[in-house]
Amino acid sequence: MIRTLTRTRQMLATPARETRSWRVLREPHFWIIVTIITCGTIFYYADTLPVLSSVETVLRIDFTRRSVHRILSILPVAYAAYIFGLRGGLLTTAVITALLLPRVFVAPAASEEAGIEVAAFAVMGVFVTWLIDVQNREKAEHRGTIASLEWTQRELRSHIQTVENEERRLQTINAVLNVVAESLQPRQILHHAMDKVQEAMGVEKSMLYLLDGDSDELTLEAYHGLSIEFVDMAKRVRVGEGLNGRVAQTGEPLVADGQATSPWLASEVGKRENLQAQLIVPLKSKGKVLGTLCAATSEPREFAPEEIELASAIGNAIGVAIENAKLYEKEREASEQLRQSEENYRGLFENATGAIEVHDLNGRITNANHAFEKLTGYNIEELKKLDATKFLEPKDVKAVEDMLRAQYRGEPVDALIEFPLRRRDGSQAIVELMPSLIIRNGRPIGVQSIARDVTEQRRMQENLRYYVSQVLKAQESERLRIARELHDDTAQALTGVSRRLDLLSSSGSDVPPDLAQRLDELREQTDAILDGVRRFSQDLRPPVLDDLGLLPALKWLLIALEEQDGIATNTRLLGEPRRLPRESELALFRIAQEALNNVRKHSRASAVELTLDFRSDSIAMTVADNGNGFELPSASGDLAVSGKLGLIGMQERARLLGGTIEIESKPGEGTRVVVTEPG
């Protein structure tokens, strides 16, 4: 604005200079000043002009020229200074001084007095001009100050009006917020908010849509002032269609008049509704559109920017309230689910057949179920005063800590810890324990342990092992007895029969040729039976095992396998060979015998390798072949179901001596049996 005025002044500056003289000449004040100056000059020179002197004599007028002249001389100066400013006053002073100056030369007798009078007038004229100019400047400053104050007052009124409007806007928003804060139920929020919207916007009709993110549609959730027919027609709107659909798509407010196009506004029902003005704003929360708010009137109306801004603020407030209500509903559902889950857990915890206890990281028991009370003999109040490590041996405590550390590192832990638990009455129970960390927010806060009393099961297993060991001992004793009887009785008898048949067939001419041939055949059959009996006797209990030990007996098995079945064999020895206890040698021999029988019958292998590793406190035997292999069951208990009874016998023999057995096999990759026993 200032620049525009400056350019306008610059454009008008030159013409103003050219016409200034004419404007001054056309100014009435200029001619008044000229008239006063003329009159004063005449009075001043009245005594020197004959005409004026005669008029003075005829009219007998006593002109006090100097007094009148002083008045008439100062008056135009003051007049010019007041009207034309400092320049006008000084110019008038100069003109009058120039008019007074000739008297100094016209009246020589009074030239000194006239000179003093002219000088005094010039000084007085300049002083009066300066004084009036100062007054004019002060008045101008006062007028400027008054104008500035008036402008400041107008600005202040404008700011006050803005503050009042903002205050009304904030009061309206605060009222809406108070309404929506009264309830966290979405439908109550919407209906209460609609009342405040109509009151604040001064409209008689309103609609509120919520966005269904799954179907990408707006659903009419609340309305006021609309007919049922119109509501049924406008109940659902797709995003991008119609006025509300466009606002939901763009997220920007929209003002529409009665000419706006919409599918349901163009219908007969829409025309009867007569929506002449609509203001539609989005309902937003965190920048996300949750729905739309429409304020409408049946009369034409222009919504001011302040009203649009107010409606947008109300829409945002409602959007935040709706979002909070949804979050509250989700939190309430989650709390209900958590409560139900806690009740279910509590029921499972209390009624579980397994003994369960919970303790903190310091070992203090915080909870336990009835099964744990029954297992230990302590009630829950007594357990809460005890340390969980009271029931464990030091080595078992370390095993539990190692398992928990592995769990915290995310390593898979499937094994159970078996330990003897000390009951309150001093008795012991054999317990299987599975501890697990309780983790909250990524940090462990406690430990939950599930214990199972396996005392009776372990006793039954011990009894079963004892029974199996007795059966195996009886079996070996029976084998030894049968082998000896076969060797001492049957084999000796068959040897005698063979020799008699040989004597009969070689007795000479007394035996017919055909009978001699039959006797030879009987002798050969007898010898074959004798070989079978000896082999059977050796299989039942080879004398080499009792006489020479494990290593020669295993070599005898490999030689027999190579000679009878043509399978290449190899023996590897590691460590210093030594004799083992009789039970250990017998168990290892039977395991190797069963493994080699499996190679002979099922594997179709071409080579077998047997390795004996004599360690300081144990011995490891490995039998590996390059045969067909087979698919191992997932659990050792399934061996009997799959018909692998020989493998079960091998496992039982190894377990009876406190050893372990590992069987590795895959189809097409052969089989590997590793037995480790103390000795």
Image (tube, rainbow, N blue to C red):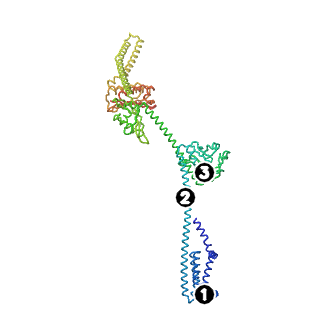
SS for dot 2: helix
Above-or-below relation of 47 to 198: below
SS for dot 3: loop
> Residue lying farthest bottom?
109
Tally of numbered tags: 3
| Mark 3: amino acid | Gly
Left or right relative to 54: residue 481:
left
Q: Which of the image's four quarters has the N terminus?
A: bottom right
Q: Earlier in the sequence, mark 2 or mark 1?
A: 1
> Residue lying farthest top?
510
Q: Residue at x 42, y 42 (%)?
A: 443
In three-dimensional space, the C-alpha distance between marks 1 and 3, rounded to whole angstroms, equals 89 Å
Q: Are marks 2 and 1 in contact (CB under 8 Å)?
A: no
Give residue 557's quadrant in the image.
top left
Residue 642 place in picture, x, y as percent: 45, 26
Q: Mark on residue 47?
A: 1
In three-dimensional space, the C-alpha distance between marks 2 and 1, rounded to whole angstroms, equals 72 Å
| Residue located beneath label 3 in the image | 202
| Mark 1: amino acid | Asp
Above-or-below relation of 160 to 318: below
